[in-house]
């Protein structure tokens, strides 16, 4: 028997449900194995979720994780890998490797590991580590130093990475690499930034994400730390500029849609967010 289960350390971060949909679901405010896997594909989904889980809560009775089964970095598209190994010090956020001819980039970081860093170096030389906002900054300096790369953060969240090599300022778009534009987006935090590459990939941090519940792009209004009104103003400022087909957030699901569909949904998101008002922090209200 497989005997897969989720142990009591689960924090309901949703990562497992993204990677093993239909096998792992939410029950009473945490992830739970809904049924044992029926086939090899579902076993691999569970193994992938296990290697992403920041608390290592996805387990198989009587067995340890085998290093040879680790699927990460996991290729999502020609230019992007999902890194897995989410860090408890980075709010369990997803992180990505963006491959570039002129030098590849980490967007946020997984848990720190020299062995993981060596894997990423095998894929491509890495020149930049881009931090979307303060609570995803924990391992930026370690990875940047390992790669000999530049660490980027916005001035609004600079106290989370005071030794950053490049500090983004203001709210105007900033070119951080060939074809890669940073759009400062104060709201979730004062220094939140999203990065758009080649008008194809949007790394949105925690500013917005794809919700399975609503089948649409949403903001995490119940955990907007700085200001929901500022987030609404930020979206209104950038919505006409953003063009992409892949939405790649720190939390919540990823999604690929035609560019015009994404643009339409972003306009609607900006309009909806303008109607929101501050509310108490409530992690249970997040619409995964």
Image: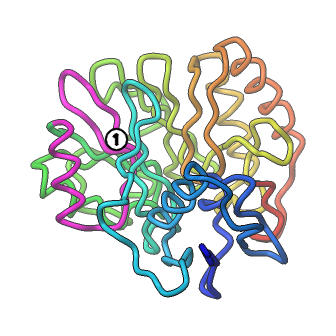
Question: Does residue 97 belong to the magenta stretch?
Answer: yes
On screen, residue 233 versus residue 101, left or right, reads right
Q: Quadrant of the N terminus?
A: bottom right
Question: Furthest-top residue in view?
Answer: 260
Relative to 228, is 139 above or below? below
Q: In the image, is residue 92 part of the stretch drawn in magenta?
A: no
Residue 15 vertical position relative to residue 214 in the rendered view, above or below? below
Where's residue 175, x and y in %? 34, 25
In the image, 254 versus 177, the foreground residue is 254
- Is 269 or 246 nearer to us in this picture? 246
Give the SS element for disc 1: strand
- Residue lying at the far front in this picture: please name it: 1
Residue occupying the point 29% across, 59% down: 140
Q: What residue appears at the point 55 percent right and 52 percent down from the top-left corner? A: 40
Q: Nearer the viewer, residue 281 or 72?
A: 72
All told, the count of numbered labels is 1
Taking depth in this image into account, of 234 and 22 the one nearest to the observer is 22
Question: At which x and y percent is residue 228?
Answer: 74, 51
> In x, y percent, where is residue 69?
37, 60
Q: How crowded is mark 1: few (under 14 residues within 10 Å), some or many (20 or more)?
A: many
> Where in the figure is residue 249, as x and y percent of width and height?
57, 44
Q: In which quarter of the image is the C terminus?
A: bottom right
What residue is shown at x 21% (from left), y 39% (from top)?
Answer: 123
* Residue 257, placed above or below residue 4: above
In the rendered structure, the answer to whether residue 190 lies left or right of residue 275 reads left
**Residue 236 as seen in the image, left or right of residue 167:** right
* Identity of the residue drawn at 17% across and 65% down: 114
Which colour scheme appears in the figure? rainbow
Direction right: furthest residue:
275
* Magenta span of residues: 96-124
- Can you identify the residue that label 1 sits on? 97
């Amino acid at each position: 028997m497989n005997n897969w289960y989720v142990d009591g350390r689960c924090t309901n971060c949703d990562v497992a449900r993204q990677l093993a949909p239909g096998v792992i679901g939410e029950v009473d405010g945490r992830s739970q194995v809904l049924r044992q896997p029926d086939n090899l594909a579902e076993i691999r989904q569970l193994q992938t979720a296990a290697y992403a889980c920041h608390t290592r809560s996805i387990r198989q009775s009587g067995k340890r994780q085998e290093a040879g089964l680790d699927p990460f970095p996991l290729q999502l598209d020609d230019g992007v890998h999902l890194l897995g190994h989410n860090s408890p010090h980075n709010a369990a956020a997803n992180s990505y490797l963006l491959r570039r001819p002129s030098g590849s980039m980490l967007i946020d970081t997984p848990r720190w590991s020299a062995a993981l860093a060596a894997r990423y170096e095998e894929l491509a030389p890495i020149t930049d580590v881009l931090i979307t906002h303060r609570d995803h900054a924990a391992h930026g300096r370690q990875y940047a130093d390992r790669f000999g790369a530049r660490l980027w953060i916005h001035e609004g969240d600079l106290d989370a990475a005071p030794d950053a090599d490049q500090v983004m300022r203001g709210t105007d778009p900033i070119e951080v690499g060939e074809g890669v534009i940073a759009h400062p987006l104060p709201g979730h935090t004062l220094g939140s930034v999203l990065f758009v590459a080649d008008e194809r990939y949007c790394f949105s941090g925690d500013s917005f994400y794809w919700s399975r519940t609503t089948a649409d792009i949403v903001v995490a209004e119940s955990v907007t730390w700085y200001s929901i009104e500022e987030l609404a103003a930020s979206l209104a400022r950038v919505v006409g500029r953003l063009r992409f087909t892949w939405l790649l957030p720190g939390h919540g699901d990823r999604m690929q849609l035609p560019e015009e569909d994404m643009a339409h949904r972003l306009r609607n998101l900006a309009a909806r967010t303008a109607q929101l008002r501050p509310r108490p922090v409530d992690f249970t209200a997040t619409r995964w």
